[in-house]
Image: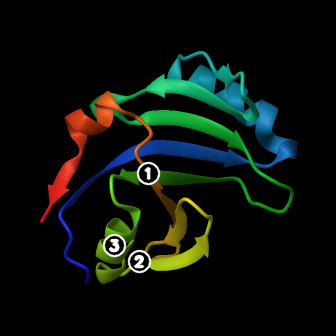
Amino acid sequence: MRHVPHRSRLAVLLLDLPPAHHAAGTAFWAGATGRTAVPDPADGDWASLGSLAGGLSLEVQRTGEGTPPRWHVDVETDDVPAEVARLEALGARRLADMGSFWQMTDPAGLVFCVVGVQTGEAFDRYAVRWP
């Protein structure tokens, strides 16, 4: 394992919905959480349901055809390679290099992504420092 001091945190819980389920799923989770789905003006496939406890964001994204409806989490970090290595040492596997981030699976096969810092102040407040 690459031992590099860095920080990371579970930052975003994403509801991945293919086109056939996107509108109904977004409406359902907005109603279930009592929140308004706020579309991202720069990306029509993305909407936010806001921040939950501990600064965790709840987001909805429209995926492509063939992707099953699923939940996935984003782990944000200030050092993507170091965090990928740390998580691999815990049993994660690399699934796809997405350019600036990695799509991975946990030991049970659940999909998650390791991404750069996206939440600014929330990252500074909630991130864990790894030796």
Out of 83 and 69, give the one closest to the viewer: 83
Q: Real-space Cα distance between discs 2 and 3?
A: 6 Å
Disc ID at residue 116:
1
Residue at 24 percent across and 45 percent down: it is 127
Q: Secondary structure at mark 1?
A: strand
- Which residue occupies the foreground of this view, 6 or 9? 6
Residue located at (50% from left, 61% from top): 112
Mark 2 and mark 3 residues within 8 Å of each other at the beta carbon: yes
Mark 3 is surrounded, within 10 Å at the Cα level, by few (under 14), some (14 to 19) or many (20 or more) other residues, namely some
Q: Amino acid at mark 2?
A: Ala
Q: Mark 1 belongs to which amino acid?
A: Gly
Identity of the amino acid at label 3? Answer: Leu
**Label 1 packing within 10 angstroms: few (<14), some (14-19), many (20+):** some
Q: Residue at x 33, y 66 (%)?
A: 83
Residue under the image location 80 percent in, 31 percent down: 23
**Rendered image quadrant of residue 7:** bottom left
> In the image, is residue 45 above or below residue 105?
above
For label 2, the residue is: 92
Query: Disc 2 versus disc 1: distance between alpha carbons?
Result: 18 Å
85 horizontally vs 127: left or right: right
Pair 2/1: label in front: 1
Q: CA distance from mark 3 to mark 1?
A: 15 Å
Pinpoint residue 62: horizontal percent, then vertical percent: 75, 43
Looking at the rendered structure, which numbered label has been put on residue 87?
A: 3
User: In screen coordinates, is 69 left or right of 12?
Assistant: right
**Apparent side of residue 123 relative to residue 45 in the rendered image (left or right):** left
Disc 2 element: loop
Q: Is residue 31 left or right of residue 13?
A: right
